[in-house]
Amino acid sequence: MIQKRFGQGHHHSHGIKKCGHGNISRRDFFGGVSIIAAGAILSGHPFSAWGAADPGRIDIHHHFQPDVYYDFQRAHGKGFDTNQWTLAKDLEDMDKAGTAVAFLSLTTPGFTFGEVNEVRKVSRGCNEAAAKLIADHPGRFGSFATIPLADTEGALHETEYALDTLKADGICLFSNYGDVWLGHATFAPVYEELNRRKTLIYVHPVLPYCCANLSVAKDGVPNEIAMIEFGTDTTRAIASLIFSGMTTKFPDITWIFAHGGGTMPFLIERFFQGGASAEIVPGILTKGQDEPPVKNSPSGEAILRELRKMYYDTAQISNPVALGALRKVIPVSQILYGTDYWYRTAVESVRGLNTSKVFSAEELRAINRTNAERILPHYRKV
């Protein structure tokens, strides 16, 4: 089903396209990669500019929009009329709130449209644009590379190139690929390779086809897609992965979910199907509904175990209600700082975290940086 929708094609190697820095050649690009590598050796650490007492935040949820991705959207009648992202404003925002490094990833609309070779070409261009930014601004950016997941051959080729040649820090997936969610069996060959590599996978929501034309939006609910659909689709993706068995079949993948896991913390009781139960909060048993009966449903403890292995960022949930709910379900060790730049600023995100009063100063340090250092040891401040 997925292959029929997206088609098959041959893998091609594409040169670096226009990405906000003008057209550059492969020689210039890889020369830049060599320069950053040499700079890291000379400085001793990519964060040498930051003081030991305040190493700066690590922003896990941080978007950029290279020209190749913007042009792709416009060619299909998607996205904004103008590119909302600029490098200068990005760096300025990072500096205002003490962001040391931001991990670049793509945002919506993703790749639920486009011909297979076109999507391969755009994915390659976006990943090379991120690598160029990393080379040009040592220590400021990391990258979660995009792959055309629904195109197995293309996804495997781009995974190899992004992780081995470009040295991306992980892979960014979208919550669904044309109403096919992440637990679908067709994705298993790609997960097998990502599991073998012990890859970080960052998941960002996109609008599913099923909810693209709901009357509630037509009746005046503003920005209904972001208000409701994104959080809901993130929850669908989490449930899809757990109940399909993908998280247990591929245990060496580290999953990171945007926006605090969407609606998962609020809907946690609904995850306990077939009468499953567990102590989400110690000493208080939470039981799910018995009807309808569910065959071979995991226990409540097993569901919680999988949820608590995953990581969740704080983008767009920097308020005491959402953060409080997330903390009750998920250990602080699994919560990562995220801003959702350029849709939200770092200053807003930090203010929300601090004024929520949900976390102690020590826990905030972990969320802002040290939790990320544990799964991204290359960025550990020493």
Image (cartoon, rainbow, N blue to C red):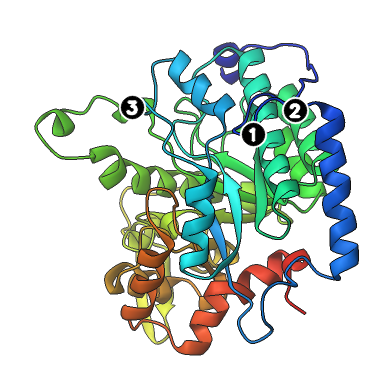
Where in the figure is residue 4, as x and y percent of width and height? 58, 11
Amino acid type, label 1: His
Element marked by disc 1: loop
Quarter holding the N terminus?
A: top right
Q: Are marks 2 and 3 in contact (CB under 8 Å)?
A: no
Rendered location of residue 332, percent (x, y): 51, 77
Residue on which the image places disc 2: 24
At 72% from the left edge and 52% from the top edge, which residue is drawn?
Answer: 169
Check disc 2: other Cα within 10 Å, few if <14, some if 14-19, many if 20+: some
Q: Between marks 2 and 3, how big is the CA–CA gap?
A: 40 Å
- The numbered mark, 1 or 3, whose residue comes first in the sequence reads 1
Q: Which of labels 2 and 3 is toward the front?
A: 2
The quarter in which the C terminus is drawn is: bottom right
Q: Residue at x 84, y 62 (%)?
A: 40
Residue 180 vs residue 83, the one in the foreground: 83
Residue 303 appears in view: no
**Mark 2 in CB contact with mark 1 (< 8 angstroms):** yes
Residue 256 shown left or right of residue 328 in the figure: right
SS for callout 3: helix
The residue mark sitting in front, 1 or 3, is 1
Residue named by callout 1: 21
The image shows residue 286, relative to residue 115, as above or below, that is: below
Quadrant of res 29: top right
**Element class at badge 2:** loop
Q: Which three-letter amino acid code belongs to the residue tagged 3?
A: Cys
Q: Give the quadrant of residue 222.
A: top left
Q: Nearer the viewer, residue 247 or 62?
A: 62
Numbered badge on residue 210:
3
At 39% from the left and 27% from the top, the residue drawn is 79
Q: Does any portion of residue 24 appear in the rendered image?
A: yes
